[in-house]
Image (cartoon, rainbow, N blue to C red):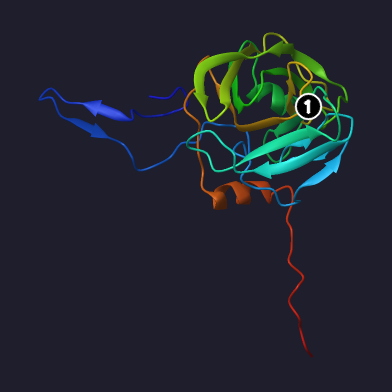
Amino acid sequence: RHTGASSDAITLASDGTAIANLSTHSRYNLIDNGEFAVNQRGNSTGSYGWCGDRFQNRTGSSTVITQTTTVPAGFSSAMQLAPSSGTATLQWNTLLEVGNNVTGTNIGNYYSANSKWTISIWATVAVSVKVNFCNDWGSGDAQEIQANTAMTSTGDTSNGFTRYKLTFDVASVTPHANNKGLQIHFSTSSAASEVKFTGAQLEEGEVAGSFDHLSYSEYLARCQRYYLQYDWTDTYES
């Protein structure tokens, strides 16, 4: 049973048989679009900007942002950041809101004191991560939960990617009244000429579980809560 589940996935009987509960999928990855399947704004170049829906490039210098199909086994898409020239410490982040009416109190209740959470990601170079309660994608009223720390390898590798993880403890950190959510800020551990990444996941507890895949339509629906792109190419006649 997963820590967030209300019933057992498999029930064993005394005669040696078992019953598996496969009727529902209880999602445990709290990061939206962690597989970078949705990229409504398209590829771009800039110091800052979207790198797939629900993620932003935060490198701070000119960076080429590209969705790619060079991926580890089991994935369909990834994002790539590359400096326009030379090398750079490449950075990207995501902001996880809590509920529809977000306040510091709600955030604090969800990411409660002394609760432990595990972040994992697949990447082509070593990655560090820091975690804050924050107002937005920047550093407004940031309340530091986890200082920038090198993530450790899980030992899993595929197609030039390594899976990295880090467990953090909220401890006694409480959000500022202006904070809108939990900000997870990734960076390459040293200057790099490019990085590809996918499979970003946050789950409660101290274990990096298998990646929680969703269908493209499920990813898109979650992203469209924040950004909805219309196609105005249709022609209407009166």
Relative height, residue 9 to residue 25 (above, below): above
Outermost residue toward the left in this view: 15
Q: Quadrant of residue 16?
A: top left
Given residues 132 and 177, the one toward you in this image is 132
In-front residue for pair 33/111: 33
Residue 106, percent from left and from top: 70, 28
Image-based side of 91 in relation to 220, left or right? right
User: Who's the residue at 66% across and 18% down the image?
Assistant: 126
Mark 1 burial class by Cα count in 10 Å: few <14, some 14-19, many 20+: many
Q: Residue at x 55, y 21 (%)?
A: 204
Residue type (three-letter) at the residue carrying disc 1: Gln
Q: Give the structural element (helix, strand or loop) at label 1.
A: strand
Quadrant the C terminus occupies? bottom right
Which quarter of the figure is the N terminus placed in?
top left
Residue 40 rendering spot, x and y as whole percentages: 71, 52
Q: Is residue 17 above or below residue 151?
A: below
Query: Does 88 appear above or below 36?
Result: above
Residue drawn at x 48%, y 35% as measured from the top left: 73
Q: Residue furthest front?
A: 86
Would you name the residue on which mark 1 appears? 91
* x then y, percent, for residue 58: 82, 30
- On the rendered structure, is 131 left or right of 24? right
224, above or below 137, in the image? below
Q: How many marks?
A: 1
Residue 79, image quadrant: top right
x and y, in percent, of residue 88 in the image:
83, 24
